[in-house]
Amino acid sequence: MATEFHTRIYDALSREYVGEFPFYDCSFNTPLGEAGEWTGTLALEEVDRETIRHLKRALNYESAWIFVYWGATIPWHGKLVAAPWNRAEGTLAAKAAGTRSWLDQVMVGRGRDVRHSWKNMEQCQITRNLVGMVATGAGGRLKIHPDARVSGIRRDLLIEPQSYGVVGELIDNLADGENGFEWDVLARDSAADGRPEFYLGQWYPERASPGAPRHLLADTGEHANILNDPGWPEDASGRRSMIHALGDGEAPAMVTAVDYDPLLDTGRVLLTEKTSSYSGQGVTTARELAGLAHAEREQLSGTLSTLTVAVALDDPVYGSWQTGDRFRLVLRDEWLDTDLSAVRCVDHSVHYAQSDGQDLVSLELDMADSLAYSRNLVG
């Protein structure tokens, strides 16, 4: 399949086009719950002197943004953070951090007198408000357009003066609670001027493509589109049957909550405990803490971790699915006879413009999530 990826640089503050350069051995990933990373290599012997001069101006670490285009879409974008020069090889090894990471570097609650409070407000609206407070497009700030997602879940959030709340962390605390949501910063070409613009993406209850497609990932005699040997992960070392969530305050008056496996009461599960602190993160009630504890225990409950599956860009067709989608996974060999109908992709890495010609994509599948999902369907 011919590569359709293009790597372009724009100035994210002025939104001016900077250039398109012949990067090769490029890779980017888009994980759930955090910012991804892009890397690419450029050989100076492949470009002329004028392009080198232009490239030196383009590598502006304050505002140079990498936009990866796949046709008319932008599957990845982020701030250029490094481009070390390797004199022996004559190459630049560029690296960029996903746009979402900028929200982990800006704050609210910086002033001495201003107090921000949301009481019984829709959680996605609180996120829009938080992003809108910082992503104004003025004073060195990115412009991030709002979305219109509604989850129906209401929450409280309090930001005291001089609390210096990091916006990304505040949103994550909302999103990671019981009945939470998933979010990211996305990009598209503006209908007004054709230049890329950022917009907020929120999904409830989980991120997925419209229509929730279930593509097949298989390594069997009848059908095989898996390119690697994925193995079979199984590890219970991180499993915990009881989680204690710790909130604000000092012992013995600290706000706490606990979540535990109901099978503990039957004596069929071994007691294993863990504490997690949410102090200073805007969690104000024991109910919110309990939701966070439950989410963490569910995450740790499985014995299977993640499985990495490599596929070609045309099977399943790249662009017809995204991180967050669920796949049918079929593996059959002398040990395995596995057919899981809803394995969730929690990260995917695209490798394009590869010098060996082997462009492909690898999917990180959350095996524990697939089993929990199946249990919920049965229940």
Image (cartoon, rainbow, N blue to C red):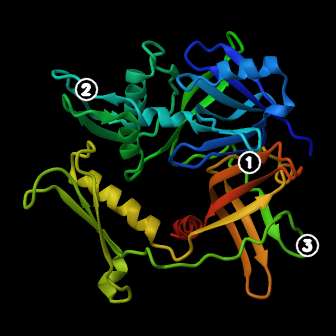
> Relative to 112, is 56 on the left or the right?
right
Q: Residue at x 38, y 74 (%)?
A: 240
Q: Quadrant of residue 80?
A: top right
Q: Does residue 236 lie above or below 55 as drawn?
A: below
Q: Amino acid at mark 2?
A: Arg
How packed is label 2: few (under 14 Cα within 10 Å), some, or many (20 or more)? some
Q: CA distance from mark 3 to mark 1?
A: 26 Å
Residue identifier under label 2: 110
Q: CA distance from mark 2 to mark 1?
A: 38 Å
Q: Position of residue 201 (x, y in %)?
A: 55, 34
Q: Amino acid at mark 1?
A: Val
Q: Secondary structure at mark 2?
A: loop
> Relative to 276, is 378 on the left or the right?
right
How packed is label 3: few (under 14 Cα within 10 Å), some, or many (20 or more)? few
Q: Residue at x 38, y 85 (%)?
A: 269
Q: Position of residue 369 (x, y in %)?
A: 55, 64
Q: Amino acid at mark 3?
A: Glu
Observer-nearest of 9 and 100: 9
Residue 222, which numbered label? 3
> Relative to 348, is 103 on the left or the right?
left
Q: Residue at x 21, y 45 (%)?
A: 284
Q: Quadrant of residue 99?
A: top right
> Relative to 140, is 75 on the left or the right?
right
Residue 350, which numbered label? 1
Q: Residue at x 46, y 65 (%)?
A: 299
Q: Does residue 366 lie above or below 172 as drawn?
A: below
Q: Secondary structure at mark 3?
A: loop
Which numbered disc flags the more N-terminal residue, 3 or 1? 3
